[in-house]
Amino acid sequence: MAAILGGGLGGLSTGYYLLKNNINNNNNLKLFLLEATDYCGGWIKSIRTKDYTFEQGPRTIRPKGIVGLNTLNMIQDLGLSEHISPITPDHPAAKNRMIYVNQNLHLLPSSLKGVFQKNTPFSKPLIYALLNDIKSPHKELEDDSIYNFVERRFGKEIADYAISPMICGICAGDAKEISVKFLMRTLFEWEQNHGGVIKGMMKSMFKSKNKSDFELSDLAKRSQEEKWNVYTIKGGLDIFPRTLTNYLKENDVKVNMNSNVREIQFVDSGTVTLKNTSGGELIANHVYSSIPAYSLAKLVHRQHPELAKNLTEIPFVTVGIVNLYFATQKPLIEPAFGFLVPPIENSPILGVVFDSCCIPDQNGTVLTVMLGGKWYKEKFGDRTTKENLLDIALHEIKKILQISDEPAASNVNILHNCIPQYVIGHYEKVGKIRQYIRDNNLPISLIGCSYDGVGINDVIYSAKTQVQKDCT
């Protein structure tokens, strides 16, 4: 019997792939999924009305790379293909992405032509950044912050106005702390192995590429043919985890809600006991943990304090989410994906997503304001209220977008410790954690955003690769 800890997308995906493995290999593995709350789906939550959809967490998914195509394969298998709403390259949300600098919104280049033109707030055409890489000296490092790497190779303006806000948008983090391997591992390896990014790229062009045996579903093929930028699900992204939950239940996975585990005890290499807060116990042969690293640390601390210490050293940040609906027939914004705010602007917000442009079937103007992240405590303290965050969001929206209307509806959510920060040395830390598990023959596998990537695609692929590894 296997127990899955956590009913977020990582835990649900683990159940999905374990079921697929059981079916393919004619196994009869009994599966239990333990979720501490009354909801499966983690941070993916949607509020639907006839006029708008508020996404309180992730809202779109990228289809790029093996990890993105893998998610599309799962979505088709779950019967959700007809619910997909893609954004293609000609869509305003794909072409129009902005940053807010010096009290003005600036459109970022979205085409090759734009790279050769001067675009404020950059003082030179972006092509000069490539020339900077060619002339910059080589520096041998084991790891580096993504900010330092980009500043070294492409210049300070690229680091400040392109990469720093991007990191705010992806993980609500500080590019000066986040590992370059988080987003630019290949570019960093090119620098370390070949002396520069351009040099490494040129040499890689002459290497034969290994053909992948990864099979694509019709939906994944369609995403490539139509060159999707991102996509979402009509009616709310939480349809995805809800469908996944139903799939598990229909295939006899025992999904136990409000099941709060207080301790994990490893009896031997093939037996583990999970004790819940109500005094009950569940005995399993293996545990798949998809809960945050800091939560797992509390469960293993008594028996394995060293493992717990390493788990707690993966930092997380809190993000405030403010959804706004303006019931006006005339759009209050120009069509775009939205804008991000570089940290050097010292703003209380990280950025704003124009949901009425990105999400289908929205009436009026719908916006989502993101606040805090790495700077949450610095900006708002420990006891800020939802009302305070709403006031701040409205003030910034009125100032930046010149919106004087009052919202007809709003929703504020504080996502406590929701996004892990892959700071310098993160991957070495994760390697050390997994090595401890191997050395002590602990029947547990680690899955989810704490370890192998923070995005939806990363979490799903993490579940797939871990299940495949354990089942071979």
Image (cartoon, rainbow, N blue to C red):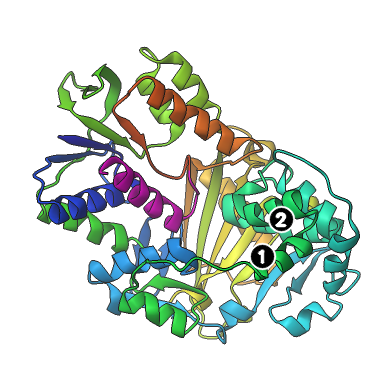
Compared to residue 177, the image places residue 207 above or below, namely below
Amino acid at pointer 2: Trp
Q: Secondary structure at mark 1?
A: helix
Task: Please tell me the numbered disc located at residue 233.
Answer: none
Percent position (x, y) of residue 444? 31, 30
Residue 236 in view (yes/no):
no
Compared to residue 126, the image places residue 436 above or below, namely above
Magenta region, residue range: 452-472
Q: Quadrant of the C terminus?
A: top left
Percent position (x, y) of residue 392? 64, 53
How many residues crowd mark 2 within 10 Å: few (<14), some (14–19), many (20+)?
Answer: many
**In the image shown, does 15 or 400 lie closer to the viewer?**
15
Is 226 positioned to the left or the right of 265 in the image?
Answer: right
Compared to residue 142, the image places residue 457 above or below, namely below
Q: Quadrant of the N terminus?
A: top left
Tell me the quarter of the picture where residue 134 sits.
Answer: bottom right
Disc nearest the viewer among 2 and 1: 1
Percent position (x, y) of residue 81? 29, 76
Residue at 24 percent across and 22 percent down: it is 277
Residue 453 inside the magenta-drawn segment:
yes
Percent position (x, y) of residue 245? 22, 54
First-in-chain label (2 vs 1):
2
Task: Please tell me the numbered disc located at residue 190.
Answer: 2
**In the image shown, does 51 or 139 lie closer to the viewer?**
139
Is 112 positioned to the left or the right of 453 in the image?
Answer: right
Q: Are the two marked residues, 2 and 1, in contact with CB atoms closer than 8 angstroms?
A: yes
The residue that disc 1 covers is 204
Residue 38 in view (yes/no):
yes
